[in-house]
Amino acid sequence: MADRIVLIILMVITLSVVFAPLLTPYDPIKIDLDSIKEPPSLKHPLGTDNKGRDILSRILYGGRFSIGIALVAGIISLCIGLAVGLLAGYYGGRVDMLFMMFIDLILSFPSLLLAIGISVIFPPGIFTVVIAITAVSWASFARLIRGYVLSLKEAPYIDSARAIGCSNTRIILKHILPNCLPLSFVVFSLKLGGYILTESALSFLGLGAQPPIPTWGSMISLNRVFILSAPWMVVFAGLAILITTLCFNIFGDVLRDKMGYRVE
Amino acid sequence: MLIPILLGVTFITFALIKALPGDPVLSLVGERARPETIDSIKRELGTDKNFISQFIGYISLLSKGNLGRSYYTQRDVAQDIIEKFPNTVKLAFTSMAIAILLGITLGFISAKNKGRPTDMFASLIAISGISLPVFWIGLILIYIFSLHLKWLPPSGTGDIRFLILPAITLSIPAGASIARITKATMLEIINEPFIKTARAKGLKENVILFRHVLKNAMIPLVTIIGLDFGSYLNGAVLTETIFGWDGIGRFTMEGIIKRDYPVVMGCLLIGTSTFVLINIVVDILYHYLDPRIRVTKQYN
């Protein structure tokens, strides 16, 4: 029940973000000084900002960046995590020890601090945020998958595969990797909400996509001085983050329970 | 384990900071300074040497408890951190207390009413809590309680009135995750045989829930509460920045914006070492609380 509702909401969000131009006639970037700080009305359902831009359009177009960045960073982290986890878990020994040391090192940083540290090295922008999120999040994937591979590689079918002369590469790619995919997908969906939050936090701190590109975090950050005179400028962008993250988190929870994994 | 991790953390932080764009010497003296002035300042700050000798120099300073001086204020970074650290600790502990209280209550209510509307509502609150952008809820609280109702000051450091809003803001995500763990663990324990025994003895449901279920649920909870300390440090950067709370989080953020490397280094180092230390304490506590557990955790 809950999963269906959440799935429908997620689809509505995705579709409306992808087809933003069909849903709103306003340009999210063009300044319109004739309609500054208008409260929500029929013409502008969520009001306008201090430069006369329609908040709804900015949220819809901003969603492309906020969700897109989280998705891309998540997929890259997952790929790196899979590669490292498979190698470390399968081969064990010194490879494993080296990788695990590095993973533990990354995980011993408070993640947002490390992401902030990384995103100040490069010029602020979409690419930088993707790097920063990936750099802090691949490690938890790698650790989890490595642990899972450790238990998988003791299975009898791996022994049989080896007995009929499969190479290590073949065993990893054809036998272990496919078995890791369901777990990976569950973990991916559990983490996605967190990536949206990290992206919005970085944008909020001015380290994310730069103006005039709208993102949910930067909308809150740039508009927060107007919170008393025009609260809608801040409230709706935050609601967009909350609802999207909430849906991803519920979806991940339901998926995990259905598949019977015990991961946080 | 502690020393290599701290060394590794120092090295990564140091490498990160050296990779930062922008020359601190140039931003210190301005673009039009004479080359001799720039050279002499570089020599004074030691930024003319190569990477490895700078790192070794930094480590030897660290071992003497010296974190260097801020490029801007010329103040001793260690001194500044010592002054600001209690503020962050005060904030972290207050919000931890709120988080534990609210989280366990919410999780308890959820587990007690499993499957009923009450549980669904409580669970929805808990999962919303981990989906909220911390900085946004902070702004909304400022809007409601400071700007509208004028009950509490919007920003600053000081007595309890200044502490309430940032502490609540910081406690929301932590409280929500405590609630989720409380519920999950309690539900697991309820299915254990010793609970059946307790029921068979005719104990009252509340006695069972409090004395047998919740007490045993404390073991994983302590871990989560301890390990979640990292999220307080994360959240502190945002929360302290929004509420103008004079702690390590805001200090870090200012350091990053001004490219004040010694400040950033010092803060990251202190933050991470606290985090690592707490993890170790939690690990020891965990063993103490539950003798069944051995160190060999395959994966978490």
Image (cartoon, rainbow, N blue to C red):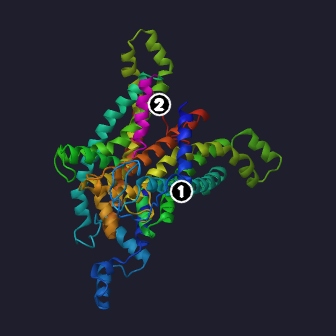
Residue type marked 2: Ala
In the displayed structure image, the side of residue B122 where residue A77 appears, left or right: right
Determine the CA span between mark 2 and mark 1: 43 Å
Which residues are the magenta region?
B116-132
Host chain of mark 2 = B
Residue B73 percent coordinates (x, y): 22, 71
Q: Name the secondary structure under disc 1.
A: helix
For the point 38% across and 48% down, the residue is A41
Q: Main secondary structure of the magenta part?
A: helix
For the point 39% across and 38% down, the residue is B176
Residue B22 percent coordinates (x, y): 38, 76
Q: Nearer the viewer, residue A90 or A227?
A: A227
Q: Write down the quadrant of residue B69 in the picture.
A: bottom left
To which residue does mark 2 refer? B184
Neighbours of disc 2 within 10 Å: few (<14), some (14-19), many (20+): some
Q: Is residue B58 above or below residue A232?
A: below
Residue type marked 1: Pro
Q: Write down the quadrant of residue B93 in the picture.
A: top left
Residue B291 belongs to magenta span: no
To which residue does mark 1 refer? A21
Q: Nearer the viewer, residue A123 or A24?
A: A24
